[in-house]
């Protein structure tokens, strides 16, 4: 006979097996069993471990005060708590939870759920890759995608998601960005709460402006958008782009890129021409204009209406008498018809330059050098008349066209200078002869008057003596006796 002695501590319990069959629950204390024909075995249970796997045999002998059975289903995970403190995660199965030394419990979590409300200390005990944590900031929102399909809208905070063989992705939305373009499936919009965002649809012939507290901050083209209104005062306004000219307030233009609209400033002395897809859309006066460019070919040309000056220099031309001249011409004109000036010529300055050049050559070739020099005003008048008709075809008004400089070759210039010098010398000689003749005639007339009037002669003598006396200190007069007698006789009288 064999004796089996077993001591069970206060934190222990015993399971007595007879011939490998569980037959008895043993409380703390000393236990003796005698074995003659049977094989006895005692397994000790540590109650501090809080639980044990449950079996039908164990349930039959388990005292009601020792514990109870808890079941974790196949789709569940359990967090074991001892006196309220989470200790470990239990997989699906049946467990005996010991209650004699502590309050032992299991918090069950259904892994079929997507979002689970779980304390952080429970999350840490979950098996790896079982739970995914997503954090959403105060200025963010999120949409959880399951197998690439939107499933849950997430507000700010921490969110725990069971993976359970799912493909998980989170779309983050930054509300500071004010808008989000919905370029994925339309189902996404159904997960957006109305208090979080407005759905904005912009058609192909429209653009939309986004306003933050009344100030334009963004321009949107065709598409569907989420406009975040949860944390900001965001509003929108849609504008049609079917018209050529923008109706958007000018203060909002700075947010509109050239992709949608171009702006033009026309000064008081300018005119603006606008073509859209090859069609002329009008002549614009002074002002600021916005022109829609999306899906259109827009051409804008500004025309300066002020008076212009064109210098045509170094034109070598042969006159009628075979003298090669060099001309410098000056042209002043204004544009009267802006549209005609743009459409009539690819290069207005080049066309005018060539026309003036040809007209000048034609006129000079038909005149001699003397005629050209003597009739410069008539040449300018003729040039102006011939150019005016052509200018009307270009929408121009000719103010003045004139020969600024007429430059002769060196030999011809010397020759002309000699001719002019000879002419001037001859003219000077004629004048000198004319003046000499006039002087002699005057002297003859004076002599005749003095001959007929001795007193006049005497007065002339005295005037001359007076003039001499004024310029000479002493005068010596040499006179004969006859002269003295005459002088004395004159004094008596």
Image (cartoon, rainbow, N blue to C red):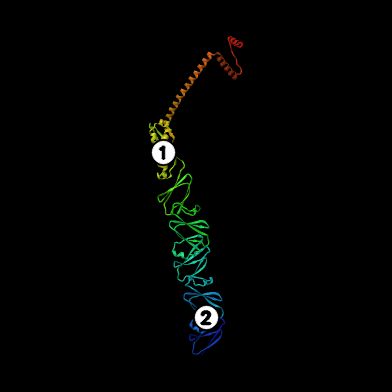
What is the quadrant of the C terminus in the image?
A: top right
Q: Is residue 160 above or below residue 365?
A: below
Mark closer to the chain start, 1 or 2: 2
Q: Is residue 42 visible?
A: no
Residue corresponding to mark 2: 68
Q: Indicate the secondary structure of the residue bearing disc 2.
A: strand
Quarter-of-image position of residue 184: bottom left
Q: Is residue 87 visible?
A: yes
Name the residue rendered at 53%, 15% in the picture.
450
The residue mark sitting in front, 1 or 2, is: 1
Q: 404 or 18, which is in the foreground?
A: 404
Q: Secondary structure at mark 1?
A: helix
- Residue 104: x %, y % from top left: 54, 78
Numbered marks: total? 2
Relative placement, left or right, of 350 versus 448 is left
Q: Position of residue 121 (x, y in %)?
A: 54, 71
Give the crowd class for mark 2: few <14, some 14-19, many >=20 residues within 10 Å: some
Residue in front for this viewpoint, 13 or 319? 319
Mark 1 nearby-residue class (10 Å; few <14, some 14–19, many ≥20): some
Q: Position of residue 289 (x, y in %)?
A: 47, 50
Q: Nearer the viewer, residue 216 or 183?
A: 216
Query: Marks 1 and 2, how far apart in space?
Result: 117 Å
Along the viewing direction, whichever of 179 and 408 lies nearer the viewer: 179
Contact check, label 1 and label 2, Cβ < 8 Å: no
Quarter-of-image position of residue 333: top left
Name the residue beneath numbered marker 1: 388
Per the rendering, the mark at residue 219 is none
Residue 358 horizontal/vertical position (percent): 39, 38
């Amino acid at each position: 006979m064999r004796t089996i002695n077993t001591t069970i501590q206060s934190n222990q319990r015993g399971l007595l097996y007879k011939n490998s069959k569980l037959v008895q629950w043993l409380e703390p204390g000393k236990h003796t069993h005698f074995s003659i024909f049977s094989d006895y075995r005692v397994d000790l249970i540590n109650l501090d471990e809080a639980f044990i796997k449950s079996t039908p045999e164990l349930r039959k002998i388990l005292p009601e005060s020792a514990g109870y059975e808890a079941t974790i289903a196949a789709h569940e995970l359990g967090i074991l708590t001892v006196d309220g403190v989470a200790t470990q995660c239990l997989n699906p199965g049946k467990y005996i939870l010991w209650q004699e030394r502590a309050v032992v419990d299991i918090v069950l979590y259904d892994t079929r759920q997507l979002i689970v409300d779980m304390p952080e200390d429970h999350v840490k005990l979950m098996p790896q890759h079982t739970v995914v944590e997503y954090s959403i900031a105060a200025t963010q929102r999120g949409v959880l995608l399951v197998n690439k399909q939107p499933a849950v809208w997430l507000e700010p905070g921490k969110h725990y998601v069971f993976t359970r063989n799912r493909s998980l992705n989170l779309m983050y939305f930054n509300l500071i960005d004010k808008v989000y373009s919905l370029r994925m499936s339309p189902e996404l919009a159904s997960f957006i709460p109305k208090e979080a965002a407005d759905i904005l649809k912009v058609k192909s012939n429209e653009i939309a402006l986004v306003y933050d507290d009344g100030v334009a901050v963004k321009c949107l083209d065709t598409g569907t958008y989420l406009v975040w209104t949860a944390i900001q005062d965001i509003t929108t306004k849609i504008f049609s782009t079917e018209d050529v000219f923008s109706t958007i307030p000018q203060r909002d233009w700075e947010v509109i890129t050239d992709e949608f609209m171009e702006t033009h400033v026309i000064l008081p002395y300018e005119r603006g021409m606008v073509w859209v897809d090859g069609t002329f859309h009008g002549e614009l006066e002074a002002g600021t204009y916005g022109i829609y460019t999306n899906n259109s070919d827009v051409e804008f040309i500004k025309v300066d209406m002020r008076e212009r000056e064109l210098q045509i220099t170094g034109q070598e031309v042969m006159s009628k008498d075979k003298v090669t001249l060099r001309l410098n011409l000056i042209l002043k004109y204004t544009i009267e018809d802006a549209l005609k000036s743009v459409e009539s010529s690819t290069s207005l300055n080049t066309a005018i330059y060539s026309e003036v050049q040809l007209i000048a050559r034609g006129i000079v070739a038909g005149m001699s050098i003397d005629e050209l020099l003597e009739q410069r005003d008539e040449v300018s008048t003729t040039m102006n008349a011939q150019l005016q008709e052509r200018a009307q075809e270009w929408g121009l008004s000719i103010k003045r066209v004139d020969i600024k400089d007429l430059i002769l070759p060196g030999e011809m210039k010397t020759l002309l200078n000699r001719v002019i010098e000879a002419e001037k010398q001859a003219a000077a000689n004629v004048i000198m002869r004319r003046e000499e003749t006039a002087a002699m005639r005057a002297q003859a007339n004076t002599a005749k008057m003095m001959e007929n009037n001795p007193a006049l002669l005497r007065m002339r003598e005295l005037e001359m003596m007076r003039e001499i006396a004024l310029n000479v200190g002493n005068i010596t007069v040499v006179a004969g006796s006859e002269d003295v007698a005459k002088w004395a006789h004159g004094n008596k009288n």
